[in-house]
Image (spheres, rainbow, N blue to C red):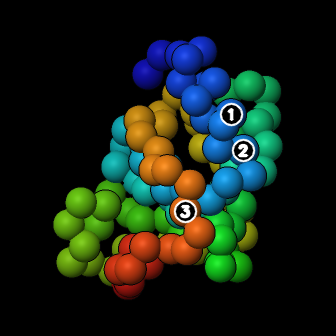
Amino acid sequence: MEYNEESFQDLQRHLCQTAIFYTADGYAYYAKIKEFVGGKIALLVPGAGQTKVIIRHPDQTFSPQGTSIIREEYTYVDLCTVVAVTSPLSAIPSGFALG
């Protein structure tokens, strides 16, 4: 994917706000951006009400039948892969972290 300055500026508005970040490879992250590293990488930390970053594996992003949930203290995401972001969230959506 190609780096897009407009997308980066949009993601900057999500700094320190909890949201779900969807990537081109099918992963979904419930987290907040703590900081940007080198302008093209985001450091994600746990979102509102969580102690870990909640990552849905691609097999669950659009069809939640599996159990592929990953929990990490933090993770890095290449901003070039982010294809969608929710509005800011105050709590994890019902069913997002089932697994």
Q: Quarter holding the C terminus?
A: bottom left
Q: Name which quarter of the figure residue 89 lies in.
A: bottom right
Vertical order, 55 against 5 (above or below):
below
Q: Earlier in the sequence, mark 3 or mark 1?
A: 1
Q: Which residue is mark 2?
A: 15
Identity of the residue drawn at 43% across and 22% down: 1
Relative to 72, 97 lies left or right: left
Tell me whether circle 2 and circle 3 mark residues in contact (CB < 8 Å).
no
Q: Earlier in the sequence, mark 2 or mark 3?
A: 2
Which of the pair 33/88 is nearer the observer? Answer: 88
Identity of the residue drawn at 48% across and 16% down: 2
Q: Give me the disc on residue 12.
A: 1
Q: Which residue is mark 3?
A: 89
Q: Name which quarter of the figure residue 83 lies in.
A: top left
The amino acid at mark 2 is: Leu
The amino acid at mark 1 is: Gln
Find numbered disc 1 in the image and state the secondary structure of the residue it sits on: helix
Q: Residue 12 location in percent, x, y?
A: 68, 34
Tell me whether circle 3 and circle 1 mark residues in contact (CB < 8 Å).
no
Relative to 7, 35 lies left or right: right
On the question of residue 72 being in view, the answer is: no
Query: What is the distance, in whole Å, between disc 1 and disc 2 at their CAs?
Result: 5 Å
Q: Residue 97 location in percent, x, y?
A: 44, 78
Find numbered disc 2 in the image and state the secondary structure of the residue it sits on: loop
Query: What is the distance, in whole Å, between disc 3 and disc 1 at their CAs?
Result: 16 Å
Tell me whether circle 1 and circle 2 mark residues in contact (CB < 8 Å).
yes
Q: Residue 70 location in percent, x, y?
A: 51, 72
